[in-house]
Image: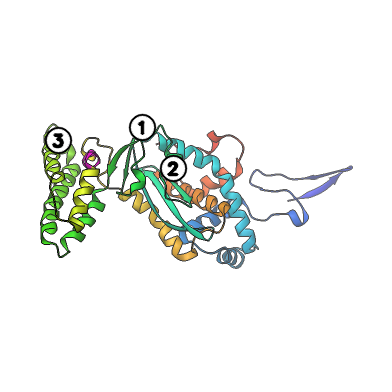
Amino acid sequence: IERGQCCSERVYQLHPDVISAAPGAARTSIGLNAVSLMGQIRVLTGASFDKIARFFTENLGLKVSKAGVLNILHNLGEHLKPSTDILTQQLRGSQAVNGDETGWWFMGESGWAWSFSDPRTCIYRIENNRGHRVVLDVLGPDFAGWLTSDFLATYDPLPYKKSKCMAHLLRFLKEIIAGTDKEAACFARRVKCFVKTAMAIKRREVCFGAQLEGFRSELEADLEVFCGCSLGGGLGKRLVKRLQKHRKHILTFLSDTSVDATNNRAERDIRPFVIFRKLCGGTRSKRGAEGLMRLMSIYTTCRKRGVDFLRFVAAARQHFGAGPKLLALPPP
């Protein structure tokens, strides 16, 4: 920055891309594009702060320490909060949301990383518990869409319209069929055929049109028969109980075209956290967890919507405090 003296006043040039005009020890040489690139490297590769600092110092000539990278990413997470708040509100207005969770180390203790997504938006949360209040906090008590999830009991108390993942049910059926209980295996094969048929109808529901309701009624009748079966015990008995407990939520994907038969979308979106966990072992502070989940939410949403992540993050960092309208991504 060019500086000079005019009479008794010190003057200097300004540019909207300059983060700070402070001199001396407070001077910063890391611009908006470099800050955005740090965030992208972090979410894409899970690289440590030390490796990111070495990359910028050795390849880009920008001298920065690993503590400097840590501070930059923490500040970036704070600047992205208005954007993630907007995305959360957009997700609450979605017709159907997929949810999933995976283990995470949070502040040195066992925690959970959550993903909530629709075709154009993804929100991540890192919490130290696996309770249903996390879902309520993200989607809100007035969420009117469908929530597709696995059979985890966490989702049972939620007051939403629910649909259960058929891929999880198929994996459970595969486990029973491979077991030694012949009666349970025979029953599981019948249920598997039922699930496969329902999923095939879902894939071709546009072709069936008016016939779809008739197919759904026949499948509902088959499901009622399965729920009335009685097996001796073990995995077979667990299967019958699962069908009875979630009977109202198993074929709901045939009643609304926006509902998926599986929660594979949420599982694909949560996969980066699984890889990230293996590389870094989790997050050590609440501020670090919040920064990571905001960066990951913005990156995944940008990828879904075809928005340039680097340009968006630079704009969000530059216009912090200028109002949420400047930070909003294109609505779904």
Q: Answer above or below: position of 84 versus 93.
A: below
Type of amino acid at the residue the image marks with label 3? Leu
Q: Is residue 66 visible?
A: yes
Q: Are marks 1 and 2 in contact (CB under 8 Å)?
A: no
Q: In the image, what residue occupies the spot 17% across and 48% down?
A: 195
Mark earlier in primary sequence (1, 3): 1
Q: Residue furthest right?
A: 8
Q: In the image, what residue occupies the spot 41% across and 36% down?
A: 92
Measuring from the top left, give residue 25's x and y in whole percent: 76, 57
Q: Are marks 3 and 2 in contact (CB under 8 Å)?
A: no
Counting other residues with Cα less than 10 Å from the Cα at mark 1, is it few (<14), some (14-19), or many (20 or more)? some
> In the rendered image, which residue does mark 2 sit on?
133
**What number is the disc on residue 144?**
1
Secondary structure state at the residue bearing disc 1: loop
Counting other residues with Cα less than 10 Å from the Cα at mark 2, is it few (<14), some (14-19), or many (20 or more)? some
**Looking at the rendering, which quadrant does residue 202 occupy?**
top left
Counting other residues with Cα less than 10 Å from the Cα at mark 3, is it few (<14), some (14-19), or many (20 or more)? some
Q: In 3D space, how far apart are the residues under numbered discs 1 and 3 (Cα atoms)?
A: 24 Å
> In the rendered image, which residue does mark 3 sit on?
212
**Looking at the rendering, which quadrant does residue 159 occupy?**
top left
The region drawn magenta spans 247-252
